[in-house]
Amino acid sequence: MPLLEIRGLKVYYRARDGWVKAVDNVDLNLERGESLGLVGESGSGKSTLALALMKLLPPQARILGGSIIFKGRDLTRLPEEEYRKIRGKEISMIFQDPMTSFNPLMKIGDHITEIIMAHEKVSKGEAWERAEKLLETVGIPGERARDYPHQFSGGMRQRAMIAIALALNPDLLIADEPTTALDVIVQAQILDLIRKLKEKMNMALLFISHDISVVMEVADRIGVMYAGHLVELADVYSIAEDPLHPYTKGLIRSIPNILLSDQKLESIPGSPPDLSNPPPGCRFHPRCPYAMDICKREEPPMIKVNDRYVKCFLYRKGDR
């Protein structure tokens, strides 16, 4: 049984004119110890899916269908009191902007001890000692636990956020664009740290980013999301060398390669659709260079092509 199995998940936001279909009938699974990357443009539903897993959706959001099976339990049916025992302990998350995730009036060490003491019966002193060791694990001197968030650089705040997420040895770590606000040097350091800690602690990792080149650094498999749909799912080598979906092809072609001096970067024309009123048929068809008449009328099914999955009429079951 997979560690995480998502089936037919629908997460919609209530808006003035109806429902915004942020995550629409998505299927995913994640094995123990596996790294799964989730990539797509802003607004594709990546972060909404992560917040649904953590049960931290905003008040206007609703899970209107599907299931999230984690270690044999359907998280969509668990009451909040039961879910608090899972959040932070079995499933943990690194958020996009650590500065807005920290309480500026609390010391870094207090942030870590709070989550430890919420789930385990330990003294404040024991929890503080563990907090210092956790900071050292992520490359921060233990004595810095007495500092406040504003006294840390951006990279150090992200390391401290990773320490909080790993405080209770979770089975699943969700990293939601953890390097977006960092420069490329610090970004590489954070990616390397996440990779090493994931292997050391044998966690499953769900890594979310809009940058497919970053996802390729840490993932075993990659899921590509577009306009609330999962449009392709394959191992990282297949995605890099032979993408199937036209949207994935566009993402790959937009990655600069310093070894190709004459490379001409390509962009995907147009803009993502309004998810309160998505286009009929395939949601990518208004921007797709391969669009056919059927793409404008019918939504393509997700089909298996060899050992990968793609949601596109260009392929038939068993092709390639």
Image (cartoon, helix red, strand yellow):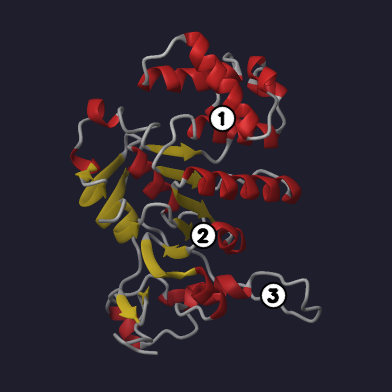
Viewer-closest of 16 and 76 = 76
Question: Residue 149 is drawn in which quadrant?
Answer: top right
Tell me the kind of residue under disc 3: Leu
Tell me the kind of residue under disc 1: Thr
Residue at 29% from the left image edge and 85% from the top image edge? 317
Residue at 63% from the left image edge and 35% from the top image edge? 138
Q: CA distance from mark 3 to mark 2?
A: 24 Å
Q: Is residue 18 visible?
A: no
Viewer-closest of 82 and 166 = 166
Label 3 neighbourhood size at 10 Å, few (<14), some (14-19), many (20+)?
Answer: few
Residue 265, labelled with which disc?
3
Q: Who comes first in sequence, dot 1 or dot 3?
A: 1
Q: Nearer the viewer, mark 3 or mark 2?
A: 2
Task: Provide the residue designation for mark 1.
Answer: 100
Q: Position of residue 193 (x, y in %)?
A: 62, 45
Question: Residue 100 is drawn in which quadrant?
Answer: top right
Tell me the kind of residue under disc 2: Ala
Q: Are marks 1 and 2 in contact (CB under 8 Å)?
A: no
User: In the image, is residue 303 above or below residue 40?
Assistant: below
Task: Provide the residue designation for mark 2.
Answer: 219
Secondary structure of the residue carrying numbered label 2 = loop
Q: CA distance from mark 1 to mark 3?
A: 34 Å
Secondary structure of the residue carrying numbered label 1 = helix
Q: Position of residue 180 (x, y in %)?
A: 62, 47
Q: CA distance from mark 1 to mark 2?
A: 27 Å
Q: Position of residue 28 (x, y in %)?
A: 33, 60
